[in-house]
Amino acid sequence: MRGARALYAAFDRFPSRKGSAVHIDRFARALFERSGGGLLYVLGGEGLPSYQREGDVEIVRYMREADHVLERAAGYGARLSALLDELPDLEIAHFRDPWSGLPIVEHDGDHLKVYEVNGLPSIELPFLYPAIPNALLEQIAEMELRCLHAADLVITPSQVTADRLPVPAHVVPNGAELRPRSERPALDRPYLLYFGALQPWQGVDTALRAVARLELDLVICASVHQRRAKPYRKLAEKLGIEARVHWHFALPEEELAPWRDHALLSLAPLRDCSRNAVQGCAPLKILESMAAGVPVVASDLPAVRELLTDGVHGRLVAPDRPGELARAIRVLLDYPEERERMGAAARAHVQAHLTWDASVARLQRLYGERMPAWPTA
Amino acid sequence: MSFALDLCSCKRGFFTLRDCANSAVTSCSACSRRICAEHITQAGLCVECVAKRSEDAALDETSTTYAIRSRQRWYGSSNYSPVWWGTSDPYWNDTDYRWYEGNDDDDGGGFGDS
């Protein structure tokens, strides 16, 4: 470990089926390519090893479980603090969250500190734990603020997020990869698709309520454990559509791709809530559907407008309105040539502006501007 | 007649993990798994057991102590007390942990998603 010049730290299991893992994969690789290797520090679990060396990259995973998520975060921080003591040559530390950021900004050392703000726990935690005390959220917000002010470079995938941060931030968009079309999946009728995680802000309930107004199947490829689907399965039952909702969980990319490539439409019914509207987001489900040439019907929110134009690459509808979502879907179902035109335009838009290669080039330029030893590409 | 291959028990890969294809040369003295020359250390432990021991050593100064130490550095100025640690330290407020419903984190940590 001694000798590593670069550190990428994320309080997130890696690899996993979540979109965040795709993001970590791209950006950590970009960092390590630039620095000639380094240390990736992430969470373990699900049988992942505590340590790997892959060429000039070392991967250390924090393994200890805890009863409480913030107890785990504290242990994760303690381990990171100790790792930092073993990195005397560190030149750059890139982190994704305050749990990683605080040990880094508090550590003595002259390394460049890069805060990649994808989400702010002070905003997201209340959606996951509604009873969390406000006083604790305020303290977490202070931690975030401490990290933001101490960072030499702040990046975020969304302009909405950049605009709300109290420090200057550079937008490095999320991306997608254009892949060849895969084989048709094993379902003998047309379907709508939702894929991604199942947090409350995703609006999966809105999608179910819209499907209840249509004569069409919905395929849900959830990136998380099926336990998270319980309330949505119950809702589907209550709506009388459980037979038309097909669930898949934690699919690897090669199994997800057929569902994505052959969907009539891909849904991103994000809620109009502080997490999406105030904090901002850049859902990979939207970008990956566009890259596959599948039109997206998504909530009309500023962060979504950054990714697609209504009527050109897909349709934007009022959030939290199942009736409007169903109406927009029905109209597109009636005009297959329109769907095809939007899908092609979406794919071309991603190819021109939103590839991972473009995002990585932008990230590496930002690194290069701040690292004299790393010439700007 | 077929022979079971004696392969290393470690994993390889960055985003997609696979089994190490190297032949095992020894067993880890801690976990007893069969390990190849690349994944064994001079101490006779596999690299994963070494990492776990380093983690335990870092946490010997338990999470509570870490939080208290950190508090002295920065948390002290903000009164960050994320969880009741079960200590008698009056600093911790025993109502702080009740919002958490238990250890059902099967989403791999983090909170958001891209």
Image: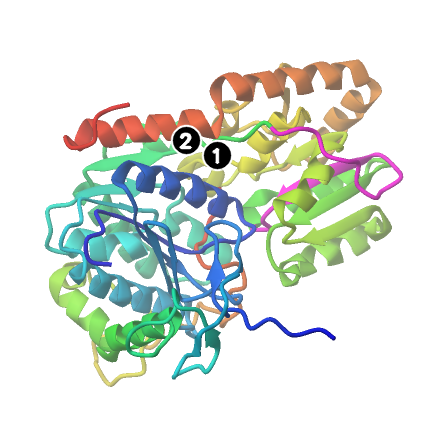
Residue at mark 2: A158
Q: Main secondary structure of the magenta part?
A: loop
Q: Secondary structure at mark 1?
A: loop
Residue at mark 1: A282
Dividing the picture into quadrants, the one containing residue A29 is top left
User: In the picture, which quadrant includes the C terminus of chain A?
Assistant: top left
Who is closer to the viewer here, A82 or A140? A82
**Residue displayed at 23% across by 29% down:** A368
- Residue A168 against residue B80 in the figure, above or below: above
* Labelled pair 1, 2 in contact (Cβ < 8 Å): yes
Who is closer to the viewer here, A33 or A156? A33
Image mark 2: chain: A
Is residue B93 something one can see in this rendering? no
B8 part of magenta stretch: no
**Residue displayed at 65% across by 45% down:** A204
For the record, the magenta segment spans A179-199
- Residue A39 against residue B50 in the figure, above or below: above
Callout 1: 10 Å neighbours few (<14), some, many (20+)?
Answer: many
**Residue displayed at 46% across by 51% down:** B14
Dividing the picture into quadrants, the one containing residue A313 is top right
Is residue A149 something one can see in this rendering? yes
> The residue under label 1 is which amino acid type?
Ala
The x, y position of residue B54, in whole percent, is: 28, 73
